[in-house]
Amino acid sequence: MKEIRCDVAVIGAGSAGLSAYRAARAAGKHAVLIEGGPYGTTCARVGCMPSKLLISAGEAAHALQVAPGFGVHPGTVRIDGAAVMDRVRRERDRFVGFVVENVEELPADDKIRGYARFTGPDTLQVDDHTTVHAERIVIATGSKPLVPEEWAAAGPRVIHSDAVFDWTDLPGSVAVIGTGVIGLELGQALHRLGVRVALYARGSSIAQLADPAVLANAASVLQEELDIRFNTQVVSVQADGQQLALVTRDGDGNTRTERYDYVLAAIGRTPNVHALRLDLAGIELDRRGIPLYDKHTMQCGTSPIFIAGDVNDELPLLPEAADQGKIAGHNAGTFPLVTPGLRRTPLAIAFTEPQIATLGAGYDDLCRSHGGRFAIGMVSFANQGRSRVMLQNRGMLRVYGEYGSGRFLGAEMIGPRAEHIGHLLSWAVQAQLTVAAMLDMPFYHPVVEEGVRTALRDLAERLKHPPPEAPQPCPDCTPGT
């Protein structure tokens, strides 16, 4: 058994792990990177990038379908499924290659191949070949898609999102279980590429939305195009020749059997912690076996163990993983000196059409933290000028502001250009701007952002009329006070 001693051991070479390793090195410490699976990060290999490749293909096909609305009539449209998936795989491999090249450039002695598990608070065993004695440890093992065992028993045609990007052709039909970001993005893209798709949701949730008005609008807008079955449970999945028989039960108790080429489970992801033997790490765990940690320092209790990325089950997004990894790696490098790192304003985007964005404090969070102390402004994109010009006039934006200070708190939306509007508004939250200060900013014409101005004007007017129990306006208040 080989033995290695180091200052910092990082378990996992994904986005969080790589950031942690580099931060620990930048702090002047000897760090090692342990990885048992393929290099390449979830984002590049099976997440952000390949999904956007498939979505872009779907958008190209959809553009031809809606072109007659502009008086433009294309000829016969043919979707070459094999060519679509060939480009997805080629470009995916290209993105993965960039990440792998970066890992390969790291010092060979800093990389350990294999799966690590704790044998003590400061000791790891990697497979059956290496023992690592580390003064500090960063857990960055990521997550994996959830597929219930009873569904998986139906055979290889029950898949999760990772498997989609290895297809060599488009299937005829897919049942997507789940209306989170992954289910909606892939379901809509496949539908637009000619695949028969139905989406099933146990409740009425859509992506990351919580605001009831935006949620209702999103359901209405998306169901204009997609076959979405809300309040529907999966009863069983069974192999049926070359297809799968999916039995579901709706909210009224009615059962229905339908056949699909594939059933795609998009019901969430689970942190990769159960093979780590965290019971030997000397840290406190929650009821699911996830380490308890400080969200500003990424430290597990007062121990020299830190956690970052999807494995902590906080915000499974690449920017968050990278930020958390940087904080965890830096604090591992400077331990026992541990300092809060920069946690940016939350921003989440679903690349559906229309796009969905949430940022800052969401509706549910504000109902808990600011009950009776926040106002809501809104705009519908149905008649917003630039949106109508582009034939993308669907969706709505709701913005939130604090009584008294007038500070802008956050927003939820479904609508055109949400990926850009989300950034604009999240920057305003992080800068602690007031609604009045935002309305002093420039707005060009005609742009979708004029809809943002409309919503902010509505919010500003509502902030003038706080309920009796809310804080009163204070002319001496500055943003963020």
Image (cartoon, helix red, strand yellow):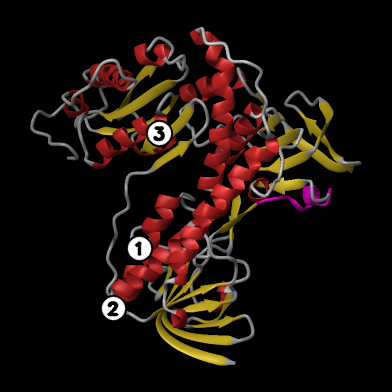
Q: Amino acid at mark 3?
A: Glu
Q: Nearer the viewer, residue 214 or 265?
A: 265
Secondary structure type for disc 1: helix
Q: Which residue is mark 3?
A: 419
Residue furthest left as drawn: 476
Q: Let me know if residue 51 appears in the view.
A: yes
Dot 3 and dot 2 residues touching (CB under 8 Å): no
- Residue 13, image x and y in percent? 49, 67
User: Which quadrant of the structure image shows residue 239?
Assistant: top right
Instruction: State which quadrant residue 379 falls in.
Output: top left
Query: Please, is residue 302 above or below residue 91 in the view?
Result: below
Q: Work out which quarter of the rendered image holds the C terminus and state it.
A: top left
In magenta, the rendered stretch is: 146-154
Please say whether residue 325 is one of the residues in the magenta stretch. Answer: no
The crowding category of the residue bearing disc 2, from other C-alpha atoms within 10 Å (few below 14, some 14 to 19, many at least 20), is few
What label does residue 28 carry, if any? Answer: 2
